[in-house]
Image: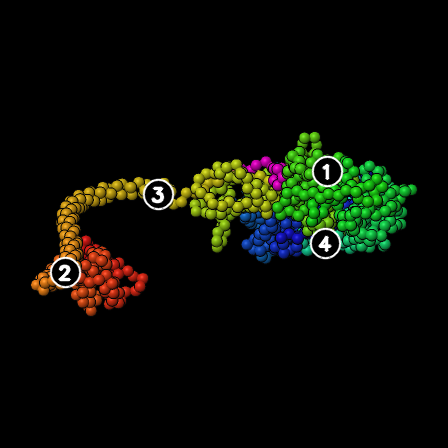
């Protein structure tokens, strides 16, 4: 990750302007320093050249380094040549490089990598040549490569390399001025016309050039390393000699507009005007501790310095942002600032500091009595009022005066009482009054004794306070502002949010939270209600808020990544996002960040040891975002990545690729882009970091659209790329021919299979019909058997019931006969006894049981056989009882058949359960029925 060092170098404007006391004139542009480990090459950077889009080329001891505006890449020649110079040819889109004993050119291949073609290699036996300068005039076919020993001319059409004729004098640096090429040899300056030299002057004794340019009047201006500049007239005579303003030894130069960019070997970097006046400087005391070996400017206008120990970039293209930092890095976290005519005051966690804006160097001075936390500063009358953790103080003419001894966070004027103020303190509220031009303490206000960090008056004179735990609180005071006569707490719907904000816009007081809610106070129902107008107005910036502030028609939102500005002009709203993003690493802690208005169009944000300055006038005129450009495309694989060809401007992606990453350049400073595949719908996807990633690709032709965005609805023009995602091997033309042949073969085979299956099916149908007939016959026979079995069961039941009836009848006859009076005749008595014995003999006759048992056993499928097999100890009486229980006869009926009493039957059942070893939970009829059911199931199967 790029490590940012924000250096404070002072723009010492020597020319007079109308705004000599403006804050803009004591600030510097953001600066980035890149270490060798970041750009992955040697520390010494000898030459710089801008390329296409945001490309910048650097020549180092280890090869060529390319920065495409997002990422760094190093390229090395096969011979690992030490590079001394680099020059980008915009017409032919190639970068020429010169080094030790060779030179050649670099060009992007179809994969987005630079490929090297060697043009010249010095003979091993020849003296060493180092090619320090390269020159090519636009429209020309000739490229000049200069070393101290020779000047070689390369013809791009023929490929021929021709040494320029010379008289044995050493060559000095080569220059392009306008559309002409110049070279110095000893005291002479020549203009090159093809392969010919034309002398311009011979008056350069001990004046070794490092740069040449055209003055505003068209004359040649020559710059030496240490001896100032020369102006030549039309005849090549020295017309004017201008010494440098400072004792500097120039090593490299470039142009930016009308100004000169000067790199030195001893005193840093300068920006000077045409008269040699120093406009700005970066020296050792500001962080530039290395010799400036090369100077360049990219296509955006940013200044690049190749150092003896790294690379530095001054973001000159950023017109709206600048820095004001303490060179000693000792003032701490800056919470607030006030801009006066001659001084700029800043309040920090270490105290109150000031600097004189007319001084020749940035120097912050501590007001000794102010040590501690300075929460806010106010310009009231002739004084600067200081809200401090120790109390309220004022500064006037260097005098630090105590107004009240108690911690104060904020101070607000009372709209209805001019000259009166209320302060929000650590433990409540206080009243102040302006007397004789000085702010004086009046009294503490009773009725509220909690911390007050933020408070605002509404148009009705109510004071509103934001409270971290309670939401919003409305206070009303008595006429003398000595006590609170009314207070009420208001809340708004939230889910996770704990942040509440108040913003006063004109007479309107707006209540907000960082979940997107926007509310206003409704006096009729005494509640906070959603406000559609301001919710719509602030919808573009109202998210992830750390703080919201309003200055007239300007709304500032501070979030995690930077600052967003919304400016309202009638019904038109302009949004600028990502402001101060370069200073993110220098931001003070979240809870103390806020935007500070220094002048009407100049705002600041507190940093560690300084201020970030924003001139919104420059914002309004900033150029629109450029269309992004695809630099590389690569397949992202599990084991390794592989680059795709960009030769035809479209992307052909192999089949079965799950992810493709496109590396972009020509991005905005936030490096945010949106992209979509048109055929997939209208939804735009977001990406940052300088690339986009396409996933879940299916075969076909698609249109990819890419545009830069600031994340708040402002976009660049759209770049379009056609994507051709190849079909897999099984969806190619040859595959379809194979499929056609395969279909024919399959149809033939299917026909044969169907024919065989038809025959088999017919045979199967025949066999099934035979089995069906056989099954029907078996079911008929089974039904007959079941019918016969049912008849037998009915007959058996009838026989049994008949036996019950006969035994019952016989018992009745026996009882009737036994009741006959035989006392008068012994003969009758004997006859009665004989009849009773016959009846009992008939009741006890077992011959009927044997027939019944045989018939019952056959009818019930061997019931007795199975029962005896399982319980061999059962007697005939037990078997007889089991049969009667199986027939579901009652105890009384069983007693009649067995010619015993009912109690005897119950006792017999009890003994039977013991013999059968049945658990109490198992019913005797159920058990015997289950045995028969099993036999019956067997018969059915």
**From mark 4 to mark 2, how far is it between C-alphas?**
158 Å
Residue 267 point in image, percent of width and height? 77, 52
**From mark 2 to mark 1, how far is it between C-alphas?**
129 Å
**From mark 1 to mark 3, how far is it between C-alphas?**
72 Å
Region of the chain picked out in magenta, as a range: 709-722
Q: Nearer the viewer, mark 4 or mark 3?
A: 3
Disc with the residue nearer the chain's start (4 vs 1): 4
| Residue position for label 2 | 821
Q: Quadrant of the C terminus?
A: bottom left
Disc with the residue nearer the chain's start (4 vs 2): 4
Q: Secondary structure at mark 2?
A: loop
**From mark 4 to mark 1, how far is it between C-alphas?**
56 Å
| Residue position for label 4 | 291
**From mark 4 to mark 3, how far is it between C-alphas?**
66 Å
Which numbered tag is attached to residue 735? 3
| Residue position for label 1 | 509
């Amino acid at each position: 990750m790029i490590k940012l060092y924000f250096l404070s170098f002072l723009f010492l404007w020597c020319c007079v302007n109308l705004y000599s006391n403006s804050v803009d004139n004591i600030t510097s542009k953001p600066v980035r320093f890149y270490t060798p480990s970041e750009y992955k090459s040697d520390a010494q950077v000898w030459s710089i050249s801008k390329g296409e889009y945001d490309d910048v080329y650097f020549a180092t001891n280890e090869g060529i380094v390319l920065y495409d505006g997002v990422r760094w890449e190093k390229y090395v020649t096969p011979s690992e040549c030490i590079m001394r110079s680099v020059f980008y040819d915009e017409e032919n889109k190639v970068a020429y490089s010169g080094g030790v004993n060779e030179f050649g050119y670099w060009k992007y291949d179809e994969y987005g990598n630079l490929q090297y073609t060697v043009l010249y290699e010095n003979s091993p036996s020849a003296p060493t040549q180092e090619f320090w300068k390269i020159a090519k005039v636009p429209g020309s076919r000739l490229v000049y490569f200069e070393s101290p020993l020779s000047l070689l001319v390369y013809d791009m059409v023929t490929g021929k390399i021709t040494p320029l004729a010379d008289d044995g004098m050493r060559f000095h640096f080569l220059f392009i001025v306008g559309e002409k090429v110049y070279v110095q040899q000893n005291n002479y300056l020549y203009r090159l016309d093809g392969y010919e030299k034309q002398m311009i002057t011979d008056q350069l004794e001990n004046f070794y050039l490092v740069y040449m340019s055209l003055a505003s009047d068209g004359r040649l201006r020559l710059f030496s390393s240490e001896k100032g500049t020369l102006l030549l007239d039309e005849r090549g005579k020295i017309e004017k000699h201008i010494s440098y303003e400072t004792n500097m030894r120039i090593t490299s130069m470039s142009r930016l507009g009308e100004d000169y960019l000067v790199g030195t070997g001893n005193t840093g970097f300068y920006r000077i005007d045409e008269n040699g006046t120093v406009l700005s400087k970066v020296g050792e005391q500001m962080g530039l501790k290395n010799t400036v070996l090369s100077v360049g400017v990219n296509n955006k206008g940013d200044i690049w310095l190749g150092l003896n120990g790294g690379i530095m970039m001054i973001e000159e293209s950023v017109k709206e942002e600048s820095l004001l930092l303490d060179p000693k890095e000792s003032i701490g976290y800056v919470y607030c600032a006030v801009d006066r005519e001659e001084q700029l005051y800043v309040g920090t966690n270490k105290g109150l500091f000031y600097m004189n804006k007319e001084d020749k160097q940035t120097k912050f001075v501590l007001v000794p009595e102010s040590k501690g936390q300075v929460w806010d500063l106010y310009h009231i009358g002739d004084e600067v009022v200081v809200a401090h953790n120790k109390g309220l103080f004022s500064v006037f003419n260097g005098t630090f005066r105590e107004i009240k001894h108690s911690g104060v966070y904020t101070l607000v004027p009372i709209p209805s009482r001019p000259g009166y103020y209320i302060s929000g303190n650590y433990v409540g509220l206080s009243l102040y009054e302006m007397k004789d031009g000085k702010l004086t303490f009046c009294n503490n206000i009773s009725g509220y004794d909690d911390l007050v960090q933020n408070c605002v008056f509404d148009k009705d004179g109510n004071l509103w306070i934001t409270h971290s735990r309670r939401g919003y609180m409305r206070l009303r005071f008595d006429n003398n502002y000595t006590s609170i006569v009314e207070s009420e707490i208001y809340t708004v719907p939230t889910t996770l949010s704990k942040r509440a904000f108040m913003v006063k816009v004109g007479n309107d007081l707006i209540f907000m939270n960082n979940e997107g809610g926007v509310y206003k106070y409704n006096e009729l129902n005494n509640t906070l209600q959603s406000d559609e107008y301001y919710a719509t107005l602030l919808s573009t910036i109202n998210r992830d808020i750390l703080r919201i502030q309003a200055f007239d028609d300007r709304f500032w939102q501070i979030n995690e990544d930077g600052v967003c500005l919304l400016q309202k002009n009638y019904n038109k709203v302009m949004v600028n996002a990502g402001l101060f993003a370069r200073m993110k690493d220098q931001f003070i802690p979240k809870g103390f960040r806020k935007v500070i208005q220094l002048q009407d169009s100049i705002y600041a944000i507190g940093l560690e040891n300084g201020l970030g300055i924003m001139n919104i006038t420059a914002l309004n005129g900033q150029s629109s975002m450029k269309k992004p450009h695809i630099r590389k495309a690569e397949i992202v694989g599990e084991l390794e990545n592989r680059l795709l060809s960009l030769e035809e401007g479209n992307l052909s992606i192999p089949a079965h690729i799950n992810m493709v990453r496109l590396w972009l350049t020509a991005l905005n400073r936030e490096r945010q882009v949106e992209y979509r595949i048109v055929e997939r719908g209208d939804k735009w996807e977001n990406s940052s970091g300088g690339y986009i990633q396409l996933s879940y690709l299916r075969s076909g032709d698609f249109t990819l659209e890419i545009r830069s965005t600031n994340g708040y609805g402002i976009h660049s023009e759209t770049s379009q790329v056609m994507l051709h995602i190849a079909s897999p091997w099984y969806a190619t033309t040859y595959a379809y021919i194979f499929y056609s042949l395969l279909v024919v073969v399959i149809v033939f085979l299917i026909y044969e299979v169907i024919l065989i299956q038809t025959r088999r099916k017919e045979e199967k149908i025949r066999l099934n019909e035979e089995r069906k007939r056989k099954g029907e016959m078996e079911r008929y026979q089974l039904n007959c058997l079941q019918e016969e079995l049912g008849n037998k069961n009915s007959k058996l039941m009838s026989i049994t019931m008949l036996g019950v009836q006969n035994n019952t009848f016989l018992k009745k006859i026996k009882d009737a006969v036994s009741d006959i009076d035989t006392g008068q005749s012994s003969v009758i008595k004997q006859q009665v006894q004989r009849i009773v014995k016959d009846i009992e003999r008939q009741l006890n006759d077992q011959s009927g049981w044997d027939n019944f048992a045989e018939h019952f056993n056959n009818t019930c499928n061997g019931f007795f056989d199975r029962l005896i097999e399982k319980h061999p100890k059962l007697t005939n009486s037990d078997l007889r009882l089991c049969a009667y229980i199986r027939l579901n006869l009652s105890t009384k009926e069983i007693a009649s058949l067995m010619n015993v009493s009912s109690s005897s039957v119950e006792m017999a059942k009890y003994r039977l359960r013991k013999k059968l070893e049945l658990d109490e939970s198992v019913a005797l009829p159920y058990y015997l029925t289950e045995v028969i059911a099993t036999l019956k199931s067997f018969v059915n199967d």
